[in-house]
Image (cartoon, grey):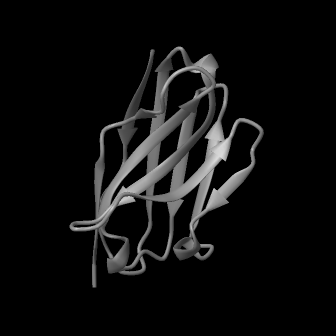
Amino acid sequence: QVQLVVSGGGSVQSGGSLRLSCAASGSTRFIYAMGWYRQAPGKQRELVADVTNGGSTNYAVFVKGRFTISKDNFKATVYLQMNDLNPEDTAVYYCNANQVVGAPVWGQGTQVTVSS
């Protein structure tokens, strides 16, 4: 089984930056991609960005070059560098790992709050 532990998040003012980390443990050899989702109050969970073990990345349109996802395959850790944050980025951010065998795994959410 895979476990995900998320760190980072917090509160910043508009225009600020935050970095999220998500470390996988357990049967990490089955992971082929990891990513970040977010869910704002009253809204559905949505993809922010994901990255494969090969380094292919996928970003949501609203990222607009502000966020960068990266993955350290040796450490089985994925990062999300978020720059130029705005209040619309306020949400609970979740880490996700997709496996070649088994269902996707979710980490605990971390609150990101951006004030204007």
As drawn, which residue projects farthest toward the bottom? 116
Name the quadrant of the C terminus. Answer: bottom left
Q: Residue at x 28, y 65 (%)?
A: 40
Q: Is residue 95 above or below residue 84?
A: above
As drawn, which residue projects farthest toward the left? 41
Q: Nearer the viewer, residue 84 or 87?
A: 87
Residue 84: give x, y in percent of width and height. 48, 77
Q: Residue at x 37, y 36 (%)?
A: 107
Q: Residue at x 59, y 20 (%)?
A: 101
- Can you tell which quarter of the image residue 65 is in? bottom right
Left or right, 40 with reference to 62: left
Residue 99: give x, y in percent of width and height. 58, 27
Left or right, 75 with reference to 48: right
Residue 67: give x, y in percent of width and height. 56, 65
Q: Is residue 23 above or below residue 80?
A: above
Q: Residue at x 56, y 56 (%)?
A: 49
Name the quadrant of the N terminus. Answer: top left
